[in-house]
Image: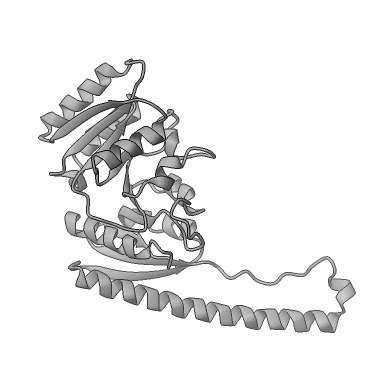
């Protein structure tokens, strides 16, 4: 059985990552792996001025740096163990029956790549350990989302199990595949769906109607809404007004709607949303 993998990093979204991954694990009745990646220690290197420092002084400096490096690594390792132990205890108390701890040395991206064969859903906080603002996404998040081929649940600082979800539909082939997958994803089973699109020209009305009927035919409760205005503002305003518990989107593509979530100036919805975002592959 494939795992739910929760990225535990000590950031302010760590608790919500535990809560979100526990919800996914219990909903899917799948094993939960609490995962922490320890970045490789940067080793001291010789500088261009090494010949002018003096061989003896240089060796002493490198020895001192190596000792500090070793001490830092030991502290990071101990901190990682304690963090994973706390997350493990929390998940067990929350009713997750199958929980494991996993610690790897290396960057988050490269260590996750070794786990993709056993991954079913990845749960990750939108703000990394070096970001304190709730409106700033972690520096590695975009790279991780692009690299992982399975479903990803991105959580904010506070997680609440969703009682409804919103699909942002843009009429593209990838968006139409999203509708098909949404009808078969156990995480969405039994939850009311808000199907939304941004279509001021009404050019997507046929595809939008077909998407609505497909969801209804699958037994889903659907509320359809065509929105106007800037995409990020329209989606977030609708979500807040209707108290939608989760935003669902397809993986990265090149349409205007999907670019809201990725790129140099297209992360507004993800950065400002207070509800989890489920990226369906």
Task: Give the x, y percent position of residue 77.
Answer: 47, 77
Instruction: Depth check: give the residue in front, 109 or 86.
Output: 86
Rendered image quadrant of residue 18: bottom left
Seen at 63% across and 81% down, the residue is 68
User: Would residue 22 be found to the left or right of residue 45 on screen?
Assistant: left
Seen at 24% across and 62% down, the residue is 22
> Farthest residue toward the front?
241
User: Would residue 48 be found to the left or right of residue 131 on screen?
Assistant: right
Task: Give the x, y percent position of residue 53.
Answer: 86, 76
Q: Is residue 209 above or below residue 83?
A: above
Task: Give the x, y percent position of residue 202.
Answer: 32, 16
Seen at 25% across and 55% down, the residue is 160
Instruction: Depth check: give the residue in front, 263 or 104.
Output: 263
Colouring scheme applied when the structure was drawn:
one colour
Seen at 62% across and 69% down, the residue is 42
Rendered image quadrant of residue 279: top left
Q: Is residue 20 above or below residue 185?
A: below
Rendered image quadrant of residue 87: bottom left
Instruction: Depth check: give the residue in front, 222 or 47.
Output: 222
Instruction: Depth check: give the residue in front, 253 or 239.
Output: 239
> Farthest residue toward the right?
52
Quadrant location of the N terminus in the rendered image = bottom left
**How many numbered marks have been drawn onto this rendered protein structure?**
0
Task: Give the x, y percent position of residue 137.
Answer: 46, 51
User: In the rendered image, is residue 183 in sight?
Assistant: no
Quadrant location of the C terminus in the rendered image = top left
Q: Is residue 144 above or below residue 130?
A: above
User: In the rendered image, is residue 21 in sight?
Assistant: yes
């Amino acid at each position: 059985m494939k795992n739910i993998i929760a990225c535990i990093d000590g950031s302010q979204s760590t608790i919500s990552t535990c809560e979100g991954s526990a919800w996914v694990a219990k909903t899917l009745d799948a094993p939960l792996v609490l995962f922490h990646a320890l970045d490789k220690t940067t080793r001291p290197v010789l500088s261009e001025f090494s010949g002018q420092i003096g061989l003896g002084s240089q060796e002493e400096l490198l020895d001192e740096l190596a000792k500090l490096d070793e001490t830092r690594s030991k502290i990071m390792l101990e901190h990682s163990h304690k963090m994973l132990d706390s997350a493990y205890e929390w998940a067990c108390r929350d009713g997750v029956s199958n929980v494991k701890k996993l610690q790897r040395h290396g960057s988050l991206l490269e260590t996750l790549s070794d786990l993709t064969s056993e991954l079913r859903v990845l749960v990750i906080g939108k703000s990394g350990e070096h970001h304190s603002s709730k409106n700033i996404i972690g520096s590695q998040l975009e790279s991780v989302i692009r690299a992982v081929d399975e479903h990803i649940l991105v959580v904010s600082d506070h997680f609440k199990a969703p009682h409804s979800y919103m699909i942002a539909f843009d009429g593209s082939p990838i968006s139409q595949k999203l509708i098909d997958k949404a009808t078969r994803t156990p995480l969405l089973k039994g939850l009311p769906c808000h199907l939304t699109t941004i279509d001021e020209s009404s050019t997507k009305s046929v595809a939008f109607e077909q998407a609505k009927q497909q969801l209804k035919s699958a037994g889903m409760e659907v509320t359809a809404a065509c929105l106007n205005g800037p995409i990020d503002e329209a989606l977030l305003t609708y979500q807040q007004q209707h108290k939608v518990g989760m935003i669902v989107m397809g993986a990265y593509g090149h349409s205007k709607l999907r670019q809201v979530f990725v790129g140099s100036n297209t992360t507004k919805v993800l950065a400002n949303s207070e509800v989890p975002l489920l990226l369906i592959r």
